[in-house]
């Protein structure tokens, strides 16, 4: 099937944009109710529920003893993969760690002119859970992208959960966990693993925060346990938007759109915005040709048919206006002088500048995180970083002079809000200190 070609401003384009916008808020009540039952079962029955649900949903039998990957198995994992695989994972790990060290936050203290000593303690979380999907494949890159920022931040205990495969452990995933410094690995996935991380079971101790992508059931469970634990974000299907001019190569654009559409849910978003009708047509042709021999051609084709389009815009200014309305996860600028246009980007998870910077570079080892806001959340959310694994505590220490100067305003503001107790607590100190 040849991808659709739309003109901005037309009726079909407006319908397409409405469908893209609708991806932000929809919830499947069937998924929510099923996830709720799973979460409640784990909360009430602990390990027994994990064991039963893993067999029921993943067709894998585990026991209380086998549900955890032993320390020896984890240590041995890097030696069980090909040398080239190990080298690639270590290269990615080094680059990801180097980037995320630059995203660290620091504690600070200062004294203002009234004598108040103010500051903030920035400290790492103690115990974090990371979810690594199973599904259609193995995702060692997800291990690195979620665990390494936590390790860089100084998290004491990193716990990984991932659905078990009927054929046994995924060697690349375990190797990545060992390289990233994961402390505990459990052979359990789905909504049940999220519940276990949040509530704890006889085998799995609860965590302070849960991060990582997953299917609709995983996302629903994360939403349900938020508040008991923190979560990173509600991850949705992958998205890519390419803004291109006549300098771009249609075959490269087609490859980049297919790359994000191949994940398999059928809800991935793949859009080209260009002022060139000829480029749009040639890119559509290249996609049609490439999908015929592509291993996941059916899945990618389904996604492009549902949420893909080659859109011919008036000019690049309109392209950036549309892109900012969509807020894509990945934004590729395959245009002349892309850096000049960078200030026009107001909403995107990650921006890839120039034809030599495809989204897969960021997906694996450029350094910045591939856990990005989706579904338009780039309007307000950020990529996962070391900063996500810190908590902040405020420091307030007042001198006598600060109380005398600021106390009356504190009491006044408290009475404005009807809180006499707040006002009196301040005025007691004010009265005694003012007499000294």
Image (cartoon, grey):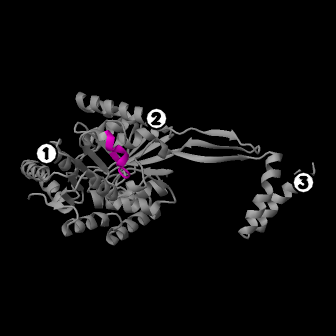
User: Which one is closest to the eye, mark 1 or mark 3?
Assistant: 1
Q: Quadrant of the N terminus?
A: bottom left
- Residue 408, quarter of picture: bottom right
Q: Residues within 10 Å of mark 2 (few under 14, many from 20)?
A: few
Q: Which of marks 1 and 3 is nearer the N terminus?
A: 1
For the residue pair 301 and 309, the one nearer the viewer reads as 309
Residue 215 within the segment the image draws in magenta: no
The residue shown at (55%, 47%) is 391
> Do callouts 3 and 2 mark residues in contact (Cβ within 8 Å)?
no
Q: Name the residue under label 1.
A: 250
Q: Give the x, y percent position of residue 230.
A: 49, 54
Q: Residues within 10 Å of mark 1 (few under 14, many from 20)?
A: many
Q: Give the x, y percent position of residue 68.
A: 39, 46
Query: Is residue 67 in view from this perspective?
Result: no
The residue shown at (35%, 58%) is 376
Query: Is residue 377 in view from this perspective?
Result: yes
Q: Name the residue under label 2.
A: 102
Residue segment shown in magenta: 339-350
> In the image, which disc is placed on residue 175?
none
| Distance between mark 1 and mark 3 Cα atoms | 77 Å
Does 359 sit above or below residue 188?
Answer: above
For the residue pair 1 and 332, the one nearer the viewer reads as 332
Q: How crowded is mark 3: few (under 14 residues within 10 Å), some or many (20 or more)?
A: few
Q: How many marks?
A: 3
């Amino acid at each position: 099937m040849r991808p659709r070609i739309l003109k901005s401003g037309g009726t079909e384009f407006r319908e397409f944009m409405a469908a893209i916008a609708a991806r932000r808020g929809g919830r499947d009540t069937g998924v929510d109710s099923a996830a709720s039952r799973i979460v409640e079962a784990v909360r009430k029955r602990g390990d027994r529920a994990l064991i039963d649900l893993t067999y029921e949903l993943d067709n894998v039998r585990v026991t209380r003893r086998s549900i955890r990957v032993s320390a020896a198995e984890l240590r041995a994992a890097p030696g069980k993969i090909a040398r080239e695989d190990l080298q690639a994972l270590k290269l990615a790990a080094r680059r990801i760690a180097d980037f995320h060290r630059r995203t660290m936050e620091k504690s600070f203290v200062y004294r203002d002119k009234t004598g108040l000593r103010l500051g903030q303690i920035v400290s790492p979380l103690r115990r974090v859970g990371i979810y690594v999907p199973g599904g259609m494949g193995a995702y060692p890159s997800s291990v690195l992208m979620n665990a390494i920022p936590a390790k860089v931040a100084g998290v004491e205990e990193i716990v990984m959960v991932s659905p078990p495969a009927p054929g046994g452990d995924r060697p690349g995933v375990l190797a990545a966990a060992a390289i990233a410094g994961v402390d505990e690995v459990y052979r359990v996935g789905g909504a049940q693993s999220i519940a276990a991380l949040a509530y704890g079971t006889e085998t799995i101790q609860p965590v302070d925060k849960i991060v990582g992508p997953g299917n609709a059931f995983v996302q629903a469970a994360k939403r349900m346990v938020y508040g008991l634990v923190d979560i990173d974000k509600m991850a949705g299907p992958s998205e890519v938007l390419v803004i291109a001019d006549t300098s771009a190569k249609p075959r490269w654009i087609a490859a980049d759109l297919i790359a994000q559409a191949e994940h398999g849910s059928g809800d991935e978003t793949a859009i080209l915005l260009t002022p060139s009708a000829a480029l749009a047509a040639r890119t559509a042709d290249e996609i049609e040709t490439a999908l015929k021999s592509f291993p996941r051609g059916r899945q990618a084709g389904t996604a492009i048919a549902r949420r893909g389009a080659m859109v011919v815009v008036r000019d690049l200014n309109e392209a950036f206006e549309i892109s900012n309305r969509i807020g894509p996860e990945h934004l590729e600028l395959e245009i002349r002088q892309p850096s000049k246009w960078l200030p026009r980007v107001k909403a995107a998870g990650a921006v890839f500048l120039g034809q030599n910077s495809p989204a897969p570079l960021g997906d694996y080892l450029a350094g910045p995180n591939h856990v990005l806001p989706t579904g338009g959340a780039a309007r307000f959310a950020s990529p996962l970083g070391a900063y996500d694994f810190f908590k902040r505590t405020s420091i307030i220490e007042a001198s006598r002079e600060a109380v005398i100067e600021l106390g009356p305003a504190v009491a006044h503001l408290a009475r404005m809000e009807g809180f006499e107790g707040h006002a009196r607590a301040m005025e007691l100190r004010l009265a005694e200190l003012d007499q000294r």
